Image: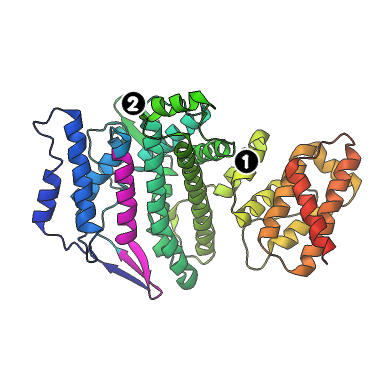
Amino acid sequence: MCTIRTSKMNSNRGIEENTLAIIDSFGVKDARDIEDDRLSFLEAVRVTSIVPENGTVPSSKMFEAIFQILRFGTTLELIITSYQLLIELEKRYPRVYLSNSELVVDKEAWSPFSFGSEGAYSDRNSTNGDLDEPLNPNGFSLLTQSIAQAADTGFKLSGIKPLADMFLFQYLIKVLERDFLPRNSVYKESSEWSLLRESLLNTLLSLDGQCIKVDVLQGSRRINYRSLFKDCLSILCKGSHAGFFDIPDGESAAKFSTQASGGVVGPTILSELGKGTVVAVQNLLTSILELEVSKKQADMKGETSRADGVRVPLLDIIVDELTYNKDLISPFLQVFSESQWKLDITLQYFEKYVPKTSLQTRRSNNTPEVSKLDVVLKCFSNVASTRSIVKKINVEVAQLLLAHAFQAYICEKADDSSLVQVCKDISAAFQNLRKIDEDMEMLQIAEEALFTAATILSTK
């Protein structure tokens, strides 16, 4: 089911040496000359590896050089060009892929992540641009934290670092996805947990999630994957607003783009970069949720061991964060578009407050979410139970959760018989909310849910 092969390094040493020689900056002092050399190097790699039908796979040193240009590029042109090249190389020369339903893993392929033991957990390679090393788990955490902090301040840009961080983050998520998705696909058929245990995503979480003590020059620190997820939620919630950046209107918008990126990128492209980062965060969270489902199945089958560790499920962390900070509920549910997981999240949130129910919101082939949604909606079927729930949350949160749960359910395309009943129940739930709070202001998302329910019922 799984084939392990060595890298297809059909490049000769002459190509590597000649290509890398282009970026040898020894004796070159002019910054513009260094930039031109690096752009020429990137183009040389593209010409030898992407343009020909039988291109040459870049060596690990060449991959690393491109990656370092992305990480520490001094101009936006360098950062964007290196990012685009790495994405093209990912598609052309995948490390993990499916071939005739068989998983093929290139064990010797270069990776932007470093999981080695020697110095792997020092954060120096996250902050020192002189060290040409792949990114370690701590570096990934710091990168995510940096983007979250910039998002919290509206990306008050002073240079290109915030933009470079987002390009780097998007690339790393694509690497994690392209490694994880084919492995998970094969796992669903073979139940071989080792395929997922060795994935980059699981390795990253296993190292990051154990709160490993990290020695640095000024003492020690601990990294925690819960903090990583909180940073992800912060980025997602910022992305729910009209603009990821605080871009002014009118004449000042042009000035903003000049100050932010040397006049290369305008507000529209900045907005697209922000949206791409939000999508990357959502893809990361979705992949982690899928990994945890597979890991739980492996646990039940006795395929895991103590070496696999124990982590608080991401679903629990998300619900906890939304519970303790209700201001996050609306922006998070607005931007998180994966309907199956959105339904799970809203149902697990209700589990804390719905009386005398036992909602297990983990995915299960034997317990469809529609039956769990039915249980929740029944608790809003009369004024007394509705009032009991609203006392524990509030009317606005109840509206948000009901509306988003209904939308997610619709996206899952339930059968017609359950669909009609759910539409009736959602309408009754909002009627009861109105009865206990006559001054209730109907949220737009709630109005949309009621309109959808009424439209469906009118056709049945």
Q: Which quarter of the figure has residue 321? A: top right
Q: Nearer the viewer, mark 1 or mark 2?
A: 1
Which label belongs to residue 160?
A: none
Residue drawn 28% across and 39% down? 78
The spot of residue 316 in percent (x, y) is: 60, 46
Residue highlighted by disc 1? 320
Whole-angstrom CA distance, mark 1 to mark 2, is: 31 Å
Identified by mark 2, the residue type is Gly
In the drawing, does residue 49 fall left or right of residue 137?
left
In this rendered view, identify the residue nearer to me: 302 or 249.
249
Q: Can residue 352 be seen?
A: no
Q: What are the residue bounds of the magenta stretch?
A: 78-105
Say which element carries label 1.
helix
Q: Quadrant of residue 243?
A: top right
The answer to whether residue 338 of the structure is visible from this angle is: yes
Quadrant, the N terminus: bottom left
Give, as a three-letter code, the residue at label 1: Asp
Relative depth, front residue between 199 and 39: 39
Query: Is 378 on the left-hand or right-hand side of 9?
Result: right
Residue for badge 2: 219
